[in-house]
Image (tube, grey):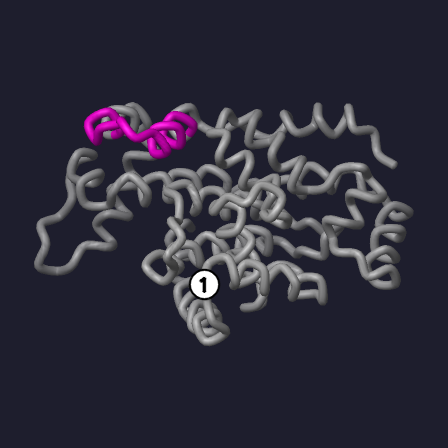
Amino acid sequence: MINLDEVISSSSDLEPLPMSVTRLASMVVSDDTDLNEIAEVISYDQSLTARLLRWANSAASANTMPVTSVDDAVMRMGTGIILEVAMAASVRKEFNQSIPEYGLTEGELWKHSIASALAVDIFKGRTSVEVPQESFTTALLHDVGKLVLMQYLDADTLGLLNTARQKGGASERQAESELLLVHHGEVGGLVAQHWKLPESIVTGIIYHHTPEEIDEPLPYVVQMANIVAKTIGTGHGMDPTDLDEKQSALNYLGFSEEDFVDICDKTRENLQEVINRYK
């Protein structure tokens, strides 16, 4: 068993998000934020300004005037995409490290996180369930708790976790809960709280494996995104317990198996191109 107080303390040790990104996250989920306020927040962050302008122009067609100002970028991209770019750029360094405790090589958590986030964008327009604005960010961060828990998984603990999964049929989350008394979703929620992200994102991270416990759209969206990302070969791949989660999410979002295959294909197509944009 690990020391929960130490885990809670370690959840605040990850490099904090830039203040501009934290403010953007809160503004995007608000109903009364105007675009001028968002542009003002961005304009005080030179690194973010440069990245957004580059992104806005990469998405522009040859017949469109170049985007040369933050105001133009906000109008061109929209608030949701702006938060996506800002958040992904901010966490890339942390997510690129290897996590051998979870069977993830260098860059694999980042790749899985981006694939999950990309899947969310493909869901829009395909489901009658509202896909919340913060879904991309929540999907991107859903496994951030693993960056903390990995510090406490020594050889003996890993052996017990693997036995619980392989011989006991437990899911990764179930094994963590039974043996560690906390799972990576809960720890990820602590990290999101430390980063002062909106409560909806915190909740989406905590319940991304068990959305039925609160029956809200965001955790189901993230659950489905995680399954898509695993299906196309990112992360540590699918295991038998993921099949139950897949069916639950398909039912909630109203996707058929054919829809799922198409979403996986489109996510796979977009993945490498988007990863290259963050280099």
Query: Where residue 154 appears, x then y in whole percent?
Result: 85, 43
On-image quarter of the N terminus: top right
Query: Where residue 173 appears, x then y in whole percent?
Result: 72, 49
Decide whether residue 23 is among the magenta residues: yes
The part of the image, by quadrant, that contains residue 49 is: top left
Question: The residue under label 1 is which amino acid type?
Answer: Gly
> Does 263 appear above or below 74?
below
> Going 52% across and 50% down the picture, which residue do you hit?
222
Instruction: Judge left or right: residue 31 versus residue 97.
Output: left
Instruction: Judge left or right: residue 207 versus residue 92.
Output: right
The part of the image, by quadrant, that contains residue 181 is: top right
> Going 89% across and 51% down the picture, which residue do you hit?
160
Please tell me which residue lies in front, 237 or 46. 237
Q: How many numbered circles does the render carry?
A: 1
> Going 66% across and 29% down the picture, which residue do you hit?
11
**Which residue does the numbered mark 1 point to in the structure image?**
254
**Can see residue 275?**
no
Range shown magenta: 22-38
**Can see residue 86?**
yes
- Extreme residue toward the bottom, this view: 258
Mark 1 burial class by Cα count in 10 Å: few <14, some 14-19, many 20+: some
Decide whether residue 244 is among the magenta residues: no
- Give the structural element (helix, strand or loop) at label 1: loop
